[in-house]
Structure formats: structure tokens, C-alpha cells
Amino acid sequence: MEYKGYTLDKFQVEAIESLERNHSVVVSAATGTGKTLIADYVIDMSMEAGKRVFYTAPIKALTNQKYKDFKASYGEEKVGIMTGDVVINPTAPVVVMTTEIYRNMLMVNDPMLQDLSYIVFDEIHFINDIERGVVWEESLIFSGEHVRFLCLSATIPNARQFADWIASIKDHDVDVVRYDKRAVPLTHLFYDAHIGICTADELEETLDDPRLAPPRGKQRKKHREKLASHVDLIRDIRSFGLPAIFFVFSRKNCEAKARELAKAFDFPGQEQKQRITEIYSRYMKPDLKRMQSAQSLRAVINKGIAYHHAGMLPDLKNVVEHLFAEGLIKVLYATETFAVGINMPAKTVCFNAVQKFDGISFRYFNSKEYFQMAGRAGRRGIDKEGTSIIVYDRRSDSLEKIRQFSEADREPIISQFKLSINTIINLINNHDDSEIETILKSNFDYFLRKQGSKQVRILASWNHKKRMLEKMGYVKNDELTEKGWFVRHIYANEILIAEIFATDLYKRLSDMEALLVVVAIAYEGRRGDRFYGIRKEFPTSDRIFKKLSNNQYVMKNLNKRHLNNVIRITKAWANGATFEELFEYSTLEEGDLIRLFRQSIDLLRQLKKASMTEELRQLASDSIAKLDRDVVKVEL
């Protein structure tokens, strides 16, 4: 079968045949094998039938990329995008969105869902994510009976089980298509300070060599262990392994290692340097060119080296992605987010470490995390094989544990179903008791267990939270009160926001104080964040807390430290400060500042939609106007 100039593989044909039968399809196929062509086909098929398709992705960078790709394929008027940042052409035949947006549309029975035929869930294995996985599960549970699913993932060991669950709750056929063979074979290697590039077996043979083992006891402090150098590794693979993505799990280390490598290598020829300059200039607005971050990046990309992480300004990430896609970047130091969905493979993928901090402690990768990143090695139609190289640290790494996650992707899809306040409110509004019980028993965990303690806990959680909502005045006689209706459009920190803004409590605050409260709620602290001059801000935060003091829930749940942290940067930005001036007030990186203000804008938009008073709608609109300017504005 030919499609878009490609001769399709058997698994692609199988998936397309299932789509033509109006079945849902779960595609479990290795990275780089062409799952995107299946999504393209379902879009073409639905558009020809006069139906709509939604394409969901787990991260905004991927939705932005897909939006640009689909615009190029189908034309600007036929493609829309909906994220927390931006809404463009939402009634188009094809709409790209974050999975959270789709879930939120389902909860309020958005009219735009009526003529939806298929929804594509890209990276469906994100259902495993502890914090966000419930969004994917709810999206499947609450989708209309007429909607079919195309679920895409690199590897799903329990794909048949997952498909059977969907079929059981949606009462339609769900086919599984597997293709485990990579388009480009992947070789797994190690890099050791003593023996260089080696296989796991070759490394194992040397681990018991007393001459190479780090000393123990008192001698350990005196001994300086020989550590593998990323510069030496690049030197060793330069002749056969570039371009390379080097995964480093620290933003600062990404930048530091890029600068170190730039001292040792200068990859591009003169023509390539001219092309780098041309592309860089295309993305650089005059005010951005002056910023230290832009100048630092310029210094390394001129050497064919770059870095990519969430703390960077969007335009700087965009220029790196463009240069890498054109083959002008030979070594890219990146954090884990670069591996999610963005179609930018390299010949080699290197790992600076195989343990990461997950918010609680350091742990080894699981197999899905490893293969998500290692899968970027090997360019279809260019490379005969891709190579994954783990930099091995004899002091702390366990070869046995590395083998456990790197030999095969064994991580099954599991349930992360839990009840948010927003979910409970919308269930009460949209369903009767019998329907609610059925929905609560529709989660994937219940399907796997049929009974058990976790299901009992979900039912107990429902009863407990419903009683709390009744006690706090959100539900009365199984119907939503005015506060309950407000919460339908709030998707995080629901009760805290409603207790302030669905009551008259916010009217005690000035407009600026109300904005500060919103930004404080939106702020998600990272380890190492530092803020300057906080003591000077105590009068402001004390004044705000005094005005809110008669609401115990707010006093207990509004984070005073977060409020103190954001006061100076929020006031400065809202009063017209330049973006560069904000760096005087904290150690927040540029990308984190933009993310904070964009999340605050998203929350203000939720407030505006939830509000039943013109006064609050106007406050939200005015606050949005204060934040939504210059580098914070989204440009696609």
C-alpha cells in the first residue's frame, strides 16, 4: 500500500484497515517506525468524511510542533491549536491540543465534541505518569460513544490488556497493532574511564579487577577516582557517531558541558557557520539578542554544539531545534524533555548518568524512560544502526540494575486513577448515582483487579470528598451550588481558588493583591529557587493574609512562602519592567519565569470563564493584560 509517497509496512496497513472499519486502535511500535503516518491517515480519512479529529500530546512543545507540521500539510485554515497558552482556530477540522484541554472539554460537555470522529493520543504511555496519568485515563473514560481512539506508543508490553479495558468500557472493537522491530537497530554500549567504549560483558569482566576498583575505607578519601569525561567520549565517537544527543539531568550541567566541549571542538565549516548565523538571526528579536542567555547560546552553536532544557526562552529552544533538524548541531546536551515526541533523532545517544531525581529521591531509570531517550538514536534511511552509550561511574552505578532497564522495555501501562475535586463536581453535575458508580468502576485498575482494596479506597475517597464538598457548600441535595458551578471550570487547587474568588473574599483585596495571590497559587517551586529582598515583602503578604484571615481553609492552604517569593517579580512585571530586570529578584531561569506567568494567565482565564459576575471577569481580564506581553506572549 502506498501513502504519501511511502510504501507502508505491514503494521501500518493493519492499523489503517482497522481505522477504516471504524475501530479504535492501539499501536505499539518502536520509535522511528512511522506511527505518525497512521495518524496522518486517520486525519485524511476523517476530513474526507466531513468529521473532525483531535490530536493530543503530553507536552506543549510537541503540540506546537504538530500544529506547524499539520498547517504545512493541510493549510492554516484547516488546523487549530488549543493549549493553556493559546487558542487558534478551535473549530477547525483538525485541532492539536494538550491532553488536559481535551479532558477539560469532556468534563463540561463542550459543544465542539459533537462531530468528533477520532482522537489521537500520542505518547499514550504517559497514562503511567504519577501526577498526570489520570488525565489520559479520564479522557478515555469520558469520551462520547461515537468517538474512536488512535493510541500511539513506542512499546506497550500489556497492549492487549489495555485495549480490552477500552473495549469493555466503550463497547466497541479495539484492535492492537504491534511492531517491535526498530527501523534502525539499536546497539547498547558503555563508556568507562579505564577501558573506554565497551559492551556490558566487556565492562563486567573488569569490574572485579582490584587495580580498577575504587578503594574502600580510609583510603577512599585520599583517592581521586578516574572519571569518564564527556569530552573524551565525543572525541572517541567523532569519526563514526555524530550527531549525538547527550542527555544530562541538570539544566546547568547541560550548559556547562556544552561550553566545555566548545573549548575542544569546532565542528562546522565556513558555509555551515554562515547558515547557523542566518538561522540564529531569524529567531532573534533585537531585545533578545542583547540578553546574556542568547549570547551564551550563540557562542556554542557557532561551534556546532548546543543545549536544550525547559529553563530556556522559547525562541532559544526553537533555534536549537531548527539547527539540530538541519544537521548543523553535532552535539546537543539536553534534559529528558527533548526525548518526548519531538522527531529529532541522532546517530548516537549518550547518557551522562542513569539515575535521576524524581522529586523524592534519586533512582535508576525505568525501562520506558530509558527507551524513550535511547530510541532517538538512529536516523531512518541514513544510519545502519543507532548507538546508545551510558557513561559508567564505578563509584555508584550497578551494572546489574542498568541491565534490568536497558535490555527491554518491560514497563506495562498501569492505572493512576484518582479523584480530583473538579472530577467529582462534574460527575455530580452530569450523572446520577447509578451512573457515577459505573464510572468509578470504569478505571483501568478496576478492570485489572475486578475487586480489591484500591477500588474500595476509590469509593471511600468519593464518599469522603463528596461529604467535604457538601459541608463546605459546594453541593446540596446532590446538586451544585453557585460555588460548585464555579469549580466546574477550575482544574487545580479548586477549593483554594473557589474559597477566594467564588465568594466575596477577593473583594477585600486590591487588584494587585488579587493578582499576587493568583501568581502565588500558580507558582511551582523547584529545588534551588532563590528570591532576593523577601523580607521587604512581608508587609504586603501580611496585609494580604490579614484580609483573608476569616477563612480557615485559605489560611491553611495558601502558601505564604510562595506569596513572598513572587511579590517582587510579579509587581515589577505588571508595572512594566523589562524582562531582564526581573533577574535581579530571583534565580529563576528565563523559561521558568515565562512558564510561571503563562500558568498564571491560564488560571486567570479559568477564573474568567468560571465567574458569574462581571466584576470578577473584569478583574481577570485586567490581570491578564498586565502579564501577557513581550516574551510571555505565545507566538506560533
Image: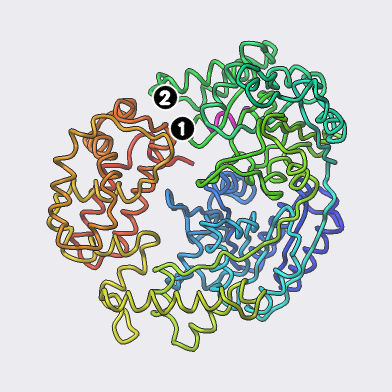
- Name the quarter where the N terminus is drawn: bottom right
Disc 2 target residue: 288
274 above or below 205? Answer: above
The one of 548 and 244 positioned closer to us in this rendering: 548
Q: What's the amino acid at mark 2?
A: Leu
Q: Main secondary structure of the magenta part?
A: helix
SS type, badge 2:
helix
- Taking the view exactly as shown, the residue that stands out farthest to the front is 218
Dot in front, 1 or 2: 1
Q: Is residue 452 magenta?
A: no
Left or right relative to 49: residue 440: left
Q: Quadrant of residue 475?
A: bottom left
Alpha carbon separation for disc pair 1 and 2: 9 Å
Asked whether the viewer can see residue 169, the reply is: yes
1 or 2: tag closer to the N-terminus: 2
299 above or below 498? Answer: above
Asked whether the viewer can see residue 325, the reply is: no
Does the CB distance between marks 1 and 2 fall below 8 Å?
A: yes
Q: Which residues are magenta?
A: 317-323
Q: Quadrant of residue 579?
A: top left
Q: Is residue 319 magenta?
A: yes
The label shown at residue 17 is none
- Taking the view exactly as shown, the residue that stands out farthest to the bottom is 434
Q: What's the amino acid at mark 1?
A: Leu
Disc 1 target residue: 313
